[in-house]
Image (cartoon, rainbow, N blue to C red):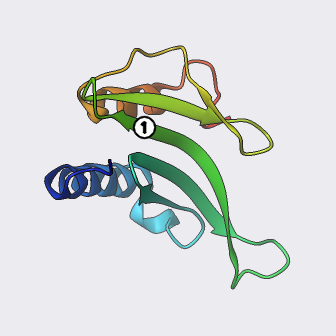
């Protein structure tokens, strides 16, 4: 079952705020954070202009948040070098996606931001 409209709007607001806060205004022509919502998954991407053609922006997956309807909890995933998703074991599932956004920001292992 996909996210409810209320939950979807709440998540859009939170993730948009996170993306705007993370990248300073003066750098947004060089790097952006964007996200997509598909079903119960919210995927965070870093985008940058392509080196050979700056009019084309490339996307690099950063993190994915998956919502489980039964437990009403979010779980954090990271992408490997082949863009395959794996559960991130450094943070427990949470009812509040903000907890997982803080973990992505903290990134103690360097798995999200390198």
- Which image quadrant for residue 6? bottom left
Question: Is 70 situated left or right of 85 in this image?
Answer: left
SS class of the residue under badge 1?
A: strand
- Which image quadrant for residue 111? top right
Which residue matches tag 1? Answer: 66
**Numbered disc total:** 1
Q: Position of residue 104 (x, y in %)?
A: 47, 32
Please say if 40 is above or below 107: below
Please say if 42 is above or below 95: below
Q: Position of residue 27 (x, y in %)?
A: 51, 64
Please say if 24 is above or below 84: below
Q: Position of residue 3 (x, y in %)?
A: 28, 50
The residue most toward the left is: 6
The residue most toward the bottom is: 55
Which residue lies at the image location 32% right of the left edge and 47% below the top edge?
1
Question: Is 53 situated left or right of 42 in this image?
Answer: right
Give the class, few, some or many, for how many residues have Cα within 10 Å of label 1's Cα (few <14, many ≥20): many
Q: Please state, as top left, top right, bottom left or bottom right, where the C terminus lies in the image.
A: top right
Q: Position of residue 74 (x, y in %)?
A: 35, 30
The residue most toward the right is: 52
- Residue toward you, 66 or 69: 69
- Residue toward you, 51 or 72: 72
Which residue lies at the image location 37% right of the left edge and 20% below the top edge?
93
- Residue toward you, 49 or 82: 82
Please say if 4 is above or below 93: below
């Amino acid at each position: 079952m996909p996210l409810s409209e209320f939950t979807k709007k709440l998540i859009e607001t939170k993730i948009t705020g996170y993306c705007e806060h993370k990248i300073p205004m003066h750098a947004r022509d060089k790097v952006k954070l964007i996200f997509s919502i598909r079903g119960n998954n919210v995927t965070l991407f870093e985008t940058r202009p392509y080196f050979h053609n700056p009019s084309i922006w490339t996307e690099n997956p950063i993190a994915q948040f998956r919502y489980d309807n039964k437990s009403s909890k979010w779980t954090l995933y990271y992408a490997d070098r082949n863009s395959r998703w794996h559960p991130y074991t450094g943070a427990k599932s949470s009812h509040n996606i903000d907890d997982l956004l803080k973990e992505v920001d903290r990134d103690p292992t360097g798995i999200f931001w390198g």
